[in-house]
Image (cartoon, grey):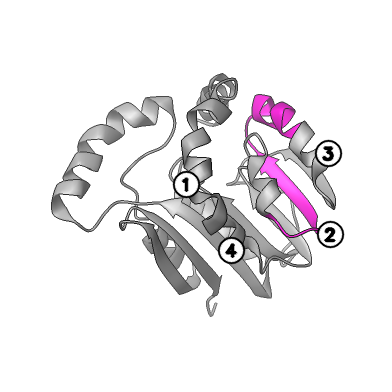
Amino acid sequence: MIDAARRKWDRAARTYDFVTRADERRYGRAKQQLFETMHGRCLMLAVGTGHDLAHCPPGLTIHALDISRAMLERAREPAAHYPGRVMLVQMDARRLAFRDATFDSIATVCTFCSVPDPVVGLRELHRVLKPDGRLLLFEHVRSRVGPIAMMQDLLTPLSRRLGPDLNRDTFGNVARAGFRVVREENVYLDIVKAGEAVRGVG
């Protein structure tokens, strides 16, 4: 499964920026607002081609991970232009090679629509986040509006072949992984959301 996911995103890397250009124009400001509280030692999960580094505050130390080596190759230039320190690392979100309570801030952008076994990956984030740290999420999710949700369910088998699932309950999965969601805001309808979570008890 890991190899299949890696191959899928390696194939997507060449056209990824072109395909996501409209979304970047639409949502760039919302991402910047979400990430403005990032501080200390930071983890950016599924950094992709690196364009979201431009939305991070300057001066941070960021471990930027992706499962795809091709994505990381394309992230080299944005990482070089970031006014701070960025370490690009190929790693599976479900098996993070970091000690417990390593990071002050963790950021994800449209990540847990694609990670196999998303609760497993989120539990890893829970493990490596410091007790007073914050998880910052910019994710698209399954709508609570019946007709929209039905359409997402119908389209997901196709979308999964190209990249993400369209119908995941990501904020529900965040809670299942042991986090407490402290903010959840709609950015576009109730499909694209920005939110924050902290470590729950236990």
Residue at the image position 70 percent from the left and 28 percent from the top? 74
Label of residue 60 in the image? none
Question: What stretch of residues is rendered in magenta?
Answer: 56-76
Mark 2 → mark 3, Cα distance in angstroms: 13 Å
- Direction from residue 48 to residue 63 in the image, left or right: right
Q: Which image quarter: residue 202?
A: bottom right
Q: Amino acid at mark 2?
A: Gly
Mark 4 → mark 2, Cα distance in angstroms: 17 Å
Secondary structure type for disc 1: helix
For disc 1, the marked residue is: 26
Mark 4 → mark 3, Cα distance in angstroms: 22 Å
Q: Nearer the viewer, mark 1 or mark 3?
A: 1
Residue 184 in picture, x, y percent from top left: 42, 68
Q: Amino acid at mark 1?
A: Arg
Q: Residues within 10 Å of mark 4 (few under 14, many from 20)?
A: few
For disc 3, the marked residue is: 80
